[in-house]
Amino acid sequence: MRSAIVLVGGAARRAGGREKYFFTFRGKTFIDRLIDTLREVADEIVVVARDPGQCERFGHLGDVRCIPDVRRDLGPIGGLHAGALAVHGEYVFVAACDMPCIHPGVVRLLFDAAAEYDAAIPSWNADMLEPLHAVYRTSALLGYLEEHESLSLRSMVRSLDSRYVCVEEIRTIDPDLLTFTNINNLEDLESIDPSAGRARDDVRGPGQMGS
């Protein structure tokens, strides 16, 4: 069984307080695009929000579970912990909610690369990794998160038996590496979708890294 976690609990400060998962790209919200992609490659999907109130925003996702952080205000580490507790798969793909172009073929590659390792982490170079576009062995993730001291994703990745997947290998599937596109603000969105600047009213909710 393969699982997926989508982290949506950030405060969206770099997006002017707007909830990035409801930004619209090519006619779909980020969260809808992500869920549609992950349904192709995962047997279950869990969305991790910061609290029960935020979970209520994702009722339209049907069979996708939304759970709140178990330990609050820990950033991505807290979301990973809650998600790892909730999923059932031996391996889990983790994604941030502000990555609307994730490629299903790349996710499959990472699942395959993670076999016999604790994690498969895309790597641009020795210092630039993609820990929030990666696959982890669920038991190893929990083993670290239940006793960790650092909130650093880098420390977490370095502590695991991780396989680093060069982006040049990923480029054979996604030549322009669009899968790693990360949207922090409206200007970033316009860089991949010029029409976004003419349709900012679409950037709304339905009712809102390298390491």
Image (cartoon, rainbow, N blue to C red):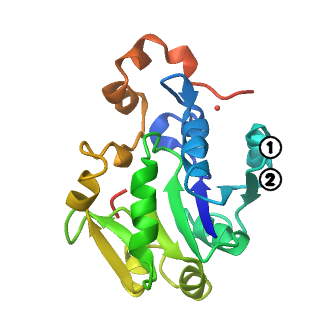
- Residue carrying label 2: 52
- At 56% from the left edge and 68% from the top edge, which residue is drawn? 92
Report which quarter residue 204 is drawn in.
top right
The picture places residue 188, in percent across and down from the top left corner, at 36, 33
Query: Rounded to the nearest whole Å, what is the CA distance between mark 1 and mark 2?
Result: 7 Å
- At 54% from the left edge and 45% from the top edge, which residue is drawn? 37
For the view shown, which residue lies furthest in the top direction? Answer: 198
User: Eyeballing the image, is 8 above or below 211?
Assistant: above
Is there a contact, CB below 8 Å, between mark 1 and mark 2?
Answer: yes
On the rendered image, what quadrant is the N terminus found in?
Answer: bottom right
Looking at the rendered structure, which numbered label has been put on residue 204? none
- Most foreground residue, 141 or 203: 141
Kind of residue sitting beneath label 1: Glu
- At 64% from the left edge and 32% from the top edge, which residue is drawn? 208
On the rendered image, what quadrant is the C terminus found in?
Answer: bottom left
Looking at the rendered structure, which numbered label has been put on residue 56? 1
The picture places residue 201, in percent across and down from the top left corner, at 56, 15
The picture places residue 48, in percent across and down from the top left corner, at 67, 57
Res 132 seen here: no
